[in-house]
Image (cartoon, helix red, strand yellow):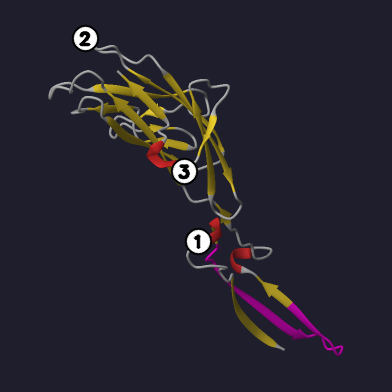
Amino acid sequence: PGIYSYLVSEESGNKDNKGGITYDTSVYKVQVKVTDNGKGALQAEVSYPDGQQGIFFKNTYKPAPETVAMDIAKTLNGRDMTSDESFKLKVKAQDEASEGTQAKDDEKDTTNGATLKSTELLFQNLKNGDKGVAPDYVTFTQPGIYQYAISEESGHAVGVTYDKSVYYVKYVVTDDGNGHLVVQTLFGKDKDKLSEFKPSEGIQRPTAEFVN
């Protein structure tokens, strides 16, 4: 017979959150009161903290965010750009899953599962015929399908023909179940026949390329 106290806790499977699991760090004190019933047997009564009926540990799973680059290229043929001019390219969400609100402080387009770094890209100081490449970035926090359209905003520069092309980018984001998001990138001018982008190709094959 006697009163026995124990501390009960969960052993973390990892200490750096690999696998996307956050372990419960709670520590519970459990008291066991053992009495002799006088009939040759011991009886045990367990008391849990705060009158609970047991001990409950709660773990959470959340994959780490994944960021991918959306490389966009721009070329001006016929002359150099002047020091005071620029070409503006716009990135716009194409469906409800990708639709977000424009944050006034940092100009980020934030959706339920993705954050677009910028909805506008400016190209300046390009030399005649040179290709300028500017990356935009999308950070994903949950699986889903996210689609964007990239186009050039027409300006009023004398003698310049603006590119009317529209490029479509589709991101298929899946969870590998081990704390990582896997992103497949599809892009092209025909949104019904997109080709897959291979990360190893880098800027040798931009997601979108505009020529004036």
Relative to 19, say whether 71 is above or below: above
Rate crowding at label 2 as few (under 14), some (14 to 19) or many (20 or more) other CA atoms within 10 Å: few
Q: Give me the residue at 57% from left, 53% from top.
A: 61
User: What amino acid is found at the position of numbered circle 2 in the picture?
Assistant: Gly
**Closer mark to the observer between disc 3 and disc 1:** 3
To which residue does mark 3 refer? 199
Q: Position of residue 197 (x, y in %)?
A: 50, 37
**For marks 2 and 3 on the same chain, the one whose residue lies earlier in the sequence:** 2
User: Which residue carries the number 2 mark?
Assistant: 159
Q: Provide the secondary structure element on which disc 1 rests.
A: loop
Return the mark for residue 38.
none
> Disc 3 marks which amino acid?
Pro
The reply to whether the magenta stretch includes residue 42 is yes
Q: How much space separates mark 2 and mark 3, taking CA atoms?
A: 37 Å
Pinpoint residue 88: horizontal percent, then vertical percent.
28, 22
Amino acid carrying label 1: it is Asn
Residue at image mark 1: 17
Residue furthest to the left in view is 83
Residue 4 in picture, x, y percent from top left: 64, 83
The residues bearing labels 3 and 1 have C-alpha atoms spaced at a distance of: 26 Å
Q: Which stretch did the figure color magenta?
A: 23-44
Earlier in the chain: of badge 3 and badge 1, it is 1
Question: Residue shown at 18%/28% (left/top)?
Answer: 125
State how far apart marks 2 and 1 are (Cα): 57 Å
Where residue 205 sits: x, y (%)? 42, 35
